[in-house]
Image (spheres, rainbow, N blue to C red):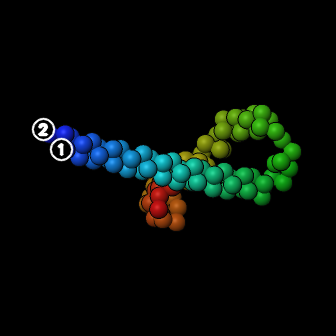
Amino acid sequence: MNTFQDSKESILIKRKEAELREAKRKENERRRKFETEMKCIIGGTFHKYFNDAYLFDKYEWDRIIGELVKTDTFTNVVRAIYSENMTKGAGNDSGAIYTPYKD
């Protein structure tokens, strides 16, 4: 091939690589936004039902939640809600079971 053809292919490859990097960056941005929103929702829900939530530090919360998830009541409630969402075909407002950070 001639150098003109090589440079043309090189430019196309670089463009595709840039598009891929941009797509990955946008996907990571959507994921981070979704995770931040979920953290705010979870934190707000904890505070709503447990007004003293902010009195504990991270390590105390690790202990509290670690013990909570070991209980049968917690496990049964999570399973019930999950199965309800599966049978309804919806776990959120979008109508899908799990669609994090989608446009």
Label 1 sits on residue: 5
Q: Nearer the viewer, residue 20 or 30?
A: 20
Callout 2 environment at 10 Å: few (<14), some (14 to 19), or many (20+)?
Answer: few
Instruction: Work out which quarter of the rendered image holds the N terminus and state it.
Output: top left
Residue 74 x %, y %: 65, 44
**Furthest-front residue in this view:** 3
Q: Is residue 42 above or below residue 68?
A: below
Label ID, residue 1: 2
Residue at the spot x=27%, y=47% of the render? 12
Residue at the spot x=73%, y=35% of the render? 62
Residue at the spot x=71%, y=39% of the render? 65
Instruction: Please name the amino acid that badge 1 sits on.
Output: Gln
Residue at the spot x=55%, y=47% of the render? 79
- Circle 1/circle 2 CB separation < 8 Å: yes
SS of the residue under disc 1: helix
Residue 42 x %, y %: 68, 52
Q: Is residue 40 visible?
A: yes
Residue 48 x %, y %: 77, 58
Instruction: Please name the amino acid that badge 2 sits on.
Output: Met
Q: Nearer the viewer, residue 53 or 3?
A: 3
SS of the residue under disc 2: loop
Q: Nearer the viewer, residue 1 or 59?
A: 1
